[in-house]
Amino acid sequence: MKNCKQYGIFIIVCMMGVHTVAQPRNYTLASPNGKIVSHIVADKGKLTYDLNVDGNTILLESPIALDRTCGTTHYRKMEVIASPERGSFNKHLESNSYTMNKLTLSLEGGLKIDFQVCNEGLAYRFRTEQACIVNKEVVVYNFAHNYRATVPYVRWSKNQFMSSFENTYTTATLSELDKRRLAFLPLLVYADQGTRIAISECYQQHYPGLYLKGTGKAGQLRGAHAPYPDQIIQGGHNNLQGIVKSSHPWIAQLQAFDTMPWRMMMVAQSDAELAGNNLTSLLAPPCRLSDTDWIKPGKVAWDWWNCWNINGVDFKSGVNNDTYKYYIDFASQYGIEYVILDEGWAVNLKADLFQVVPEIDLPMLVEYANQRGVGLILWAGYYAFARDMEQVCKHYSAMGIKGFKVDFMDRDDQIINEFYYHTAAICAQYHLLVDFHGAHIPAGIDKVYPNVINFEGVYGLENMKWAPAEVDQMEYDVLIPFIRQLGGPMDYTPGAMRNAAKHCYYPCWSEPMSQGTRCHQLALYLVLDQPLAMLCDSPTEYMLDPEYTSFLTAIPTTWDETRVLQGEIGQYIVTARRKGTTWYIGGITNWTERDIEIDLSKFASSKNIVLYKDGINAHRKGNDYKVEQPQFSNTLSIHMAPGGGFAMKIEP
């Protein structure tokens, strides 16, 4: 009997032990201000997290998983194998300090997952301690309700993973999103009680980019990734693209200690707060360059958009030496730092950047520009640049070229994302700037390599050369500061001098125009982040209005402080930026005219003010504007015409 009792006790103890092991592991992580809280649960090889804002559940339990093969071992489960690591640290941006709270879980197979939360939002990422193949990553957002979302779909094509990352936005409930179409990042979800959730990612060096799509289920988004390319052939635009003909059945190939992208949920409780969210910059890795003094942001006189349309000269304009001397003289006259030679300076269809067209003498133009304090930047198609990158950079850096605008990547699989970082490193070695076109959002690369001075990934002004009149660029302009710009600086290329009221716009390739007013174009240099800011129109057009052009070209392109003063998503925005002791304030509106009041008491008193605003007839003729020098007062009232804007300079 005694032995039976002892055996029974042993069984009970064993059962208790099994029950204890099977208990879910629960972790809570909160922002420094306590408003953002996430509950992370590890249970039976599954990992989930949620999101609560001000006590409201925004995101229900959502799964996180990584299916990977390390050598001959296949890992599917998210088994936590050690106690969590917790901590906090501070990070500084501009004049502000941010506290980040973190939680790290160790998983089987040498995998770690980091969670970080600050007052700006919540993010997580994987890190691997051993080489592996990532077969699939599970990214699912189970929102508490069928919220509305504003998303940029990939344009229709046979292969949606081949994309220029340019499209206008679609707004619908999550269940109404087209299940057949991928959306690229960032995208925006409108949650309860005015809470805004912007979903994006940061740091994609060794990993494909994330897409999201609706599933038809209320409140749900699910992730997708481009597979790892197997066969890539030359083709596409002028034989300058890498076309993926076949792919592997997995998405990434990682080395030991590689880091995967941050999955970010930026949180804001007002539209203006959202536009000022800095989570991408806070999560970006540190700068890898020991010397950055040579990196000079600035403005660029650009040729392609205006089709080399200059007049009043005694030579035929086009891709030739005389035309670029004209652009260089214009840049020198107005203190513009750079001139770009866009597509056409290298022989077409050769994908060879050492074959320069006979009409162009690059060494002569470099010397001509240097004598006038202007740098030259060259356009390069992806395939031509990638095939000879080291030699191209070495050759043109020695010649005196200041940077490259690399275009038509149009993918974000792992190979392309590694190309971005490799390009940035090689160009930095030769003191060259990089402007990536045909590319997704920067996702933090501009912090790692500050010589990556701009990224496209935006439905910019170039589209006004061909977009039909029903495209509402004015609404798009007041969406991107709240969505696209959260992913980093953009090469929108503003500066149009032919400005069309709503009933006057039409697409024109050779003499393009903007929708909206001239002051709307001017304000874009303040509302948008663009360290390399293009002047898209013809020098001839700018020189017809020297007062306006002098004001425009004096606007800095990098800033010491930024404040989003007011705004409403898709309606309008007002942004203030400081350089030294001088403040600039810019505002834009959609096609709705509006009157706003700006509190100038925040910018001290006894200031000199110069204000460019829409003229009284700007609703009829978009280039109508007025210059004022109002007396300083605590508030200033400004009227914006339909599609209008304003720009203001405040200095001692």
Image (cartoon, grey):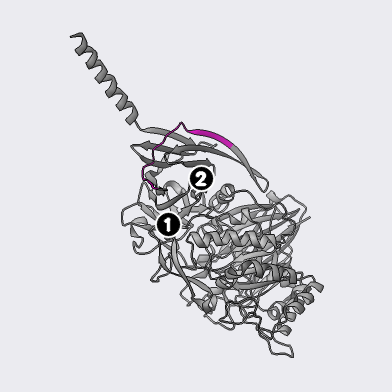
Amino acid at pointer 2: Gly
The answer to whether residue 571 is visible is: no
Q: Which residue is mark 1?
A: 251
Would you identify the image quadrant in which residue 539 lies? bottom right
Q: Compared with residue 21, is residue 363 higher up or lower down, i.e. above or below?
A: below
Which is more toward the observer, 435 or 504? 435
The stretch in magenta equals 72-88
Q: Is residue 218 above or below residue 305?
A: above
State the SS at label 1: loop
Q: Which residue is mark 2?
A: 121
Where does the image place residue 543, in percent across and percent down from the top left?
73, 78
Can you name the residue that lies furthest to the right here?
A: 371
Mark 1 and mark 2 lie on one chain; the one further toward the N terminus is 2
Q: Residue at x 51, y 47 (%)?
A: 256
Identity, as a three-letter code, of the amino acid under mark 1: Ile
Q: In the shown orientation, is residue 468 left or right of residue 599?
A: left
Q: Secondary structure at mark 2?
A: strand
Could you tell me residue 483's position as x and y percent? Answer: 51, 58
Determine the residue positioned at 45% across, 61% down. 184
User: Which marked residue is nearer to the observer: mark 1 or mark 2?
Assistant: 1
- Please tell me which residue lies in front, 122 or 12: 12
Residue 353 in the image: state x and y as whole percent. Answer: 63, 76
Decide whether residue 69 is among the magenta residues: no
- Residue 441: image tag: none
